[in-house]
Amino acid sequence: MGVQGLEASTRSLAWFGTPDPQMHRALAQAGWRVVAIDPCGDDAAAMIRGIDAWVALVEFDAETPLRLVEQLASQHPEVQWLALVQPDELAKPAVRDLIRFAFFDYFTPPLDVGQLGLALGHAWGKARLGRVDGAPKAVDLDGMVGASRAMHALALRIRKFVPVDVAVLVTGETGTGKELAARTLHRLSARASGPFVAINCGALPEKLVQSELFGHERGAFTDAATRKIGRIEAAHGGTVFLDEIGDLPLEAQANLLRFLQDGTIERVGGHQPIRVDARVVAATHVDLERAVAEGSFREDLYYRLNVLRLHMPSLRERNGDVELLAHHFLDAFRREHGTRVRGFTQAAKDAMAAYPWPGNVRELMNRVRRAAVMADGPLITPAHLELAEPDGMLPAFSLESARDSAERDMILDCLRESRFNVSECARRLKVSRVTVYRLCKKHGLARSRTSSADGP
C-alpha cells in the first residue's frame, strides 16, 4: 500500500487517537514518524513540542474533549491540524465550528491512505513556509529571545494580546519569565507611556495587604498618619502586574474582584469610590483551578482574570533555545561589565544541552553570569557553569539514580518481552501508550523500534 504526495525524509505526525496498524506502517514507509498522543494527557502539549511535530491529526468521536483540543490547537498555531471525524460528530455545530476555524483539512471514515498522504504533504508544506532551512527564525520580542517553536507560538500570542485591553493570566513554572512577558505586553501596548506597577502578592504582609493594594486614608488604623496611595491606584493609566496571585488572601480577592468588575477601588478607611484605569496582568505558578476547587481562590475572580491566558513554556520545552539564550546573556553581561570572555567550549554547550534546568531561564541567566566572572580564559567551561560533563555519572548512592535505573530496567525488560510492541508493553505495565513513549524518550530506549507500527 503506497502513500502519495510524501517526501522521503522523516517527519513527525502527532496522532491524537489510535492509528490503524496498517495505516501506521504505510505512513512509516513514506517517511512519517507517527506518535500516538492522548489529548486528555497532562503531557499532550509537551509531546507535540518534544517530537517536533509540524502536523497533527485528531480523531473525533463522542468522547473527544473538544475544549482540550481547541486549547491545544490555539497553543500551537504553527502546527497544521487535520481531523478524522465520524459523520455523527460532524453533524454537531461545536465540532464543525472547531474544524472550520482551527483545522487545515478533515476526513470522514473510511480513511483513504492516498488521500491522507496528499493532505499530510500539503499541510507539511504549509507549515514549512514560516521556516528557513527547515528551522524557525530566531525572535527577539522586546528582550524575550528564542528560536524554538514554543517561543514562536508565545510571541504570536503576545502580539495578539497587545491591542486587546483586557485582563491576562500568565501561567508557567518559576523562572520562565512571567514578569518579563507582562512587561512586554505593557511596553508594546498603547499604555506604554503609563506606569508599570509590579506587585508580588506572596510577599505582602498579611495585615497590610489591603493597604498596600488599595491604599488607606489618614487615621484608618494605628500608625496611619497620612493618606497612602495604593499600588493599584498608582498604576492608573498603565498596567498593574499581580505576581503570585494565588497567594492573595480571600478578603483582598473580593476587593480585587470589584476593581475588575467596575474599575473602582476604595482606600482602607475611605468611603468614596475611586476610578482607576489600569490593565491587570496576573501571574501564577500554581494550579488556580485546583485552588478554586479547594476553596482558597474565588471562582468568580478566576474567571475575571482568565480572560486571556498566556502560558510560559519551560526551558525543557524550548528545544534548541538554551545555547541561544546563553550567548544572549553572555553578550549582555559583556556589554555591561566589559568581561573578556567570548563564548563557550563545546563541552559547556553539551553540558547545558544535557542539563534539565529546573530553574528555567532565570537559572540559566544566573549560571552564565557567574561563569563569566569565574572564567580565567576566553571560553566558559562546564566547571565555570557548575555543571557536570555530559558523560558524567551521578553519585553512586544517589536515590534519583537508583529510581531511574530501576525504571529504565523495567521498561526495557517489558519492551523485550513484548517484542517492542508498545501497546502490549503499556497493557502489561497498566499505563497508557503515551506514558511508555515518554519513558522511552526519557531513558533513550529503542527509539527506532518503538517508533514503528504496533498493535492497537
Image: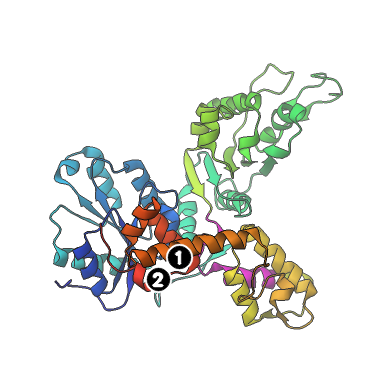
Instruction: Sort mark 2 into few (<14), some (14-19) or many (20+) by Cα contacts within 10 Å.
Output: few
Q: Residue at x 17, y 47 (%)?
A: 86
Query: What residue sits 85% from the left and 20% below the top?
Result: 222
In the picture, the disc for residue 447 is: 2
| Magenta residues, start to end | 313-332
Prevailing secondary structure class for the magenta stretch in the rendered image: helix
Quadrant including the N terminus? bottom left
User: How many numbered tags mark residues here?
Assistant: 2
- Amino acid type at circle 1 is Lys
Q: Is residue 319 magenta?
A: yes
Image: 205 above or below 332: above
Which circle marks residue 401 in the picture? Answer: none
Q: Quadrant of residue 357?
A: bottom right
Identified by mark 2, the residue type is Arg
- Image coords of residue 252 (percent x, y): 65, 27
Q: Secondary structure at mark 2?
A: helix
Q: Judge whether residue 400 is colored magenta.
A: no
Q: Position of residue 319 (x, y in %)?
A: 50, 66
